[in-house]
Amino acid sequence: MQIYTPDWVKHAVFYQIFPDRFAKSHHPHKKLLKNASWEAWDEMPTLQGYKGGDLWGVIEKLDYLKDLGINAIYFTPIFQSASNHRYHTHDYYQVDPMLGGNAAFRDLLEAAHERNIRVVLDGVFNHASRGFFFFHDVLENGPHSPWVDWFKIHDWPVSPYNGEYPANYEGWDNNRALPVFNHDNPEVREYIMEVAEYWIKFGIDGWRLDVPFEVKAPGFWQEFRDRVKAINPEAYIVGEVWEDSREWLDGTQFDGVMNYLFAAPTIAFAAGDRVVMEQVQGRSYHPYPPLFAKEYAEKIQEVLALYPWEIQLTQLNLLASHDTARLLSIAGGDRASVELATILLMTYPGAPSIYYGDEVGLPGALDPDSRRAFPMEDKWEQDVLSYHRYLIDLRNRYAALRTGAYQVLFAETTVYVFSRVLGGEEVIVAVNVGTASGKAHISWDETGLRSRPSEILYGSAELEWGEENPSQLSLTIPARTGCILTAASS
């Protein structure tokens, strides 16, 4: 079958926002919680505390994102909830009043779309929460509730709060705060489909689906895709699946997944033995043990072979998220590791995603530390922001870095070199993760590339063509750096 994925995603640079922690406004339309006792913005976050970020604050930051080169936002959940992360959904039709409600979200959508920035929302459709109206009715009325079959009730009485008694219903990951939907119930299925359709009609540009692999009902995600795409064929559907995702990336379900299969080897290569093991062990991805260039090339080729090219171009590529430690902390504070990995991220097929704050050097260990508030400007690492902005600009300027073919040219010891080619546009990317300068030796005639690189777009390198063999290129890259090259424009 022919696979179709949204074209705009292939040219997108995403920015992931955790709404409570990104920006707090003083908007004149803000009627609620003007004087709430929020956690101090610059203090370490807690599991249950709120810092008061809202959607009007995001609106005020849109010009900053536009200047950075961002053209798509992925929001972690924004619907009414009783948790700072909002994965405990109370009402799927209402944006949380702490964030400004539906009115603020409509303003944000309009403001984002005016700047050609797309907006993707987090769909938490595997489970709801104890505060979800339908489940609350079960709590009040027990087996007499008309909503009993919407959940997986095992026995009575249910115990939603008291851990001394069995919950007697299925909660996600055995968490009684998150009652799991019964997706085999046609009414539940229809409810979720209508929620998805409602927000697509409202104007969102796609859905990121939380733990979609937990939904086992046959044909569920096929129907979800059909109904969403019937309203907006260009809507993006991306699943949170951390491992081999061929089961969902057959062209009938998701357009892509959060590409932890790219993140893990990239971190293992860029950070190597700097990886702080307690920040990654036991997680659902494996950025360890350290990889040399040859091993990294093998891992990347395996990932590129997993899915059709049309799917590869709409993967959501990332180095960190709200579910992981931030790369700076994973790498023990080594800033070169972050820059090297960011070069690889911004030059890889698929849509790169920046976790808010990474672009200004924000650290963060595992949750809740990785969900710190976005720092004030005087705390920004300006050099980190500068290279993020420059690398994003290169990606936006060179179509080859977005949709061009990917070919490994050299991968030995600590040096990795590859090309991205689209038509006559050829870009070469080289990184050296070693602590000494490294050399790549490339027989140019064997690469199939038409133009010799002569212009350095990013970083530094020494190019030397062989005297006896003019097609032999020796590329010298300084320690712990990367460079991007192309043929000089005429």
Image (cartoon, rainbow, N blue to C red):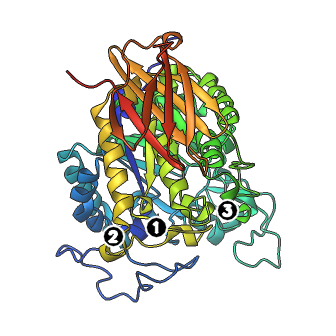
Tell me which label, 3 or 2, sits earlier in the chain: 2
Placement of 40 over or under 105, stated as above or below: below
Residue 235 at least partly seen: no
The residue indicated by pointer 1 is 362
Mark 1–mark 2 Cα distance, whole angstroms, equals 15 Å
- Classify residue 380 as left or right of residue 226: left
| Amino acid on which disc 2 is placed | Ala
Mark 3–mark 1 Cα distance, whole angstroms, equals 51 Å
| Amino acid on which disc 1 is placed | Leu
Placement of 42 over or under 226, stated as above or below: below
SS for callout 2: loop
- Classify residue 108 as left or right of residue 176: left
SS for callout 3: helix
The residue indicated by pointer 3 is 144
State the image coordinates of residue 248 (x, y, percent, origin top left): 61, 30
Q: Residue 237 carries which label?
A: none
Quadrant location of the N terminus? top right
Q: Residue furthest front?
A: 468
Mark 3–mark 2 Cα distance, whole angstroms, equals 44 Å
Instruction: Pick whichever, 381 or 416, lies toward us.
Output: 416
- Classify residue 111 as left or right of residue 465: left
The residue indicated by pointer 2 is 23
